[in-house]
Image (spheres, rainbow, N blue to C red):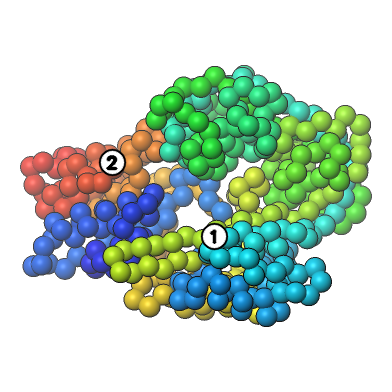
Amino acid sequence: MKFTNPTDACNFFGATGGEAGEGCTFAKQYFAGWGGSSTATLEFARFPTESTRAHIYGGGVVALSTPVQLAAALDAGTTLNVPVNGVTLTACFGTAPACTNLAGSTTYEELGLAVQSALNASPVTLGTITGTITPVSMAINVGVARESVAVQVNSVGGTLYNGAYVCGKSSPCLSDSSDQINQIENQMIWAPETVLQGPGWYSWFNSPAHNGFHMRYPTETINGIASYGVLTVTSYDNGSAIAAPMGINDGGVHIPATSYVWECISLCGQVGAQWIVNNAATVSKPETLNLTSVQVTVRWHSRTNGATTWGYFDVQQTGAAQPIGVNTIGYATGSAAKILGLSEGSPEYPGVLYSGAFASSPGNTVTSIGAWLDEFRASVDSSWTSCEIDYPSAVVPDTLPNEIQDWAIKHPPIQCPASWVSTPPSTPSLLSCVDGEPSCLRQ
């Protein structure tokens, strides 16, 4: 997304609130330096240093209707189809049998949650296998920041797989444990100090604060428990082959709800294959296990900048399921899709650039900082000569600024000093370095 003035950027990101608000703050800082005598362009791109899921970002035109108006339009007897990972989730709205009535939804947030529940009400059965699950728990020492999705694992008493839950004390640590800090989503293998499946930098699905984990201080070192399950396949029975992401259940007997298979670790495709399961369930004797489609979340995101107030619905697979590899999503179809702004071509909110519907797919993550930047310049835009990460320094791995800087040094005249990774305003300012002023870090 390219902006040539702060108003357009702030209309898109909103003036306050989380990373979006930082985008607005950064734009104001950047354009203030240029004054009125020069033209400048500020470009934003999603930089997935953590795990990222496929999304449908809905069209902002939906915000022209009130939640009550949207609910009434949906309840006229509409259907919604969302393709996720090659499977289509369906829902219907209105008073017909088995449909969801939305008449009680009076806010956008309530409407999103109601649509989410409707889509998740009837998961698609993909197949069945027979197998056992062995719970695994181990001690883990983590450096945790209250508002960060990055976590530094200082030590771990075993092999740490993506998908594991981390708790303060509960053993095993499960998806519904009251002291769950968060779930390990992805190992940042690009960080030099990271040991594969051992100590190093990982990403959470969301921040500990967002997850409801209480911390006395903004950053803490916690001696906790990490848990996951190891599924052993004793036979392949019906339907699709096991793959990630897929839901797994036994009808509620032994396996917690919202359990998912994450990755194969041995004998893949054979009898005896072992898979990581996010919940540390205990299935000691072989039993029939159902493989299902993953659940989705439907969230409303509001944006306000002065007199401009808009928002959009965002659909993605649940955080409990594996986000890398086959994680895909497509535009929604059915009569409800256009009403919710989730159909292809759903228009933007008037006057807000880039606010039309966009399907971002597949999910992905950065495995090499330099390779990602090379690919971006080769396939997206090669015109820029300076860059900054629009994250506060407290929420990114310590080594990320140096990784960016080292890449830039090898690609003159690009400048991306590590000192720019800070809560805006930058120190030194981006513009002063572009102009080559003495305050700029020399490379």
**Is residue 133 at least partly visible in the picture?**
yes
- Mark 2 and mark 1 lie on one chain; the one further toward the N terminus is 1
Q: Amino acid at mark 2?
A: Ser
Question: What's the mark number on residue 422?
Answer: 2
Q: Which quadrant of the figure has residue 223?
A: top right
Q: Which amino acid, by three-letter code, is at mark 1?
A: Glu
Q: Residue at x 56, y 32 (%)?
A: 181
Q: Is residue 203 visible?
A: no
Specify the quadrant of the image occupied by residue 165. Answer: top right
How many marks the image carries: the answer is 2
Q: CA distance from mark 2 to mark 1?
A: 32 Å
Q: Residues within 10 Å of mark 2 (few under 14, many from 20)?
A: many
Q: Quadrant of the C terminus?
A: top left
Does 303 sit above or below residue 413? below
Label placed on residue 109: 1
Q: Is residue 173 left or right of residue 209?
A: right
Nearer mark to the viewer, of 2 and 1: 1
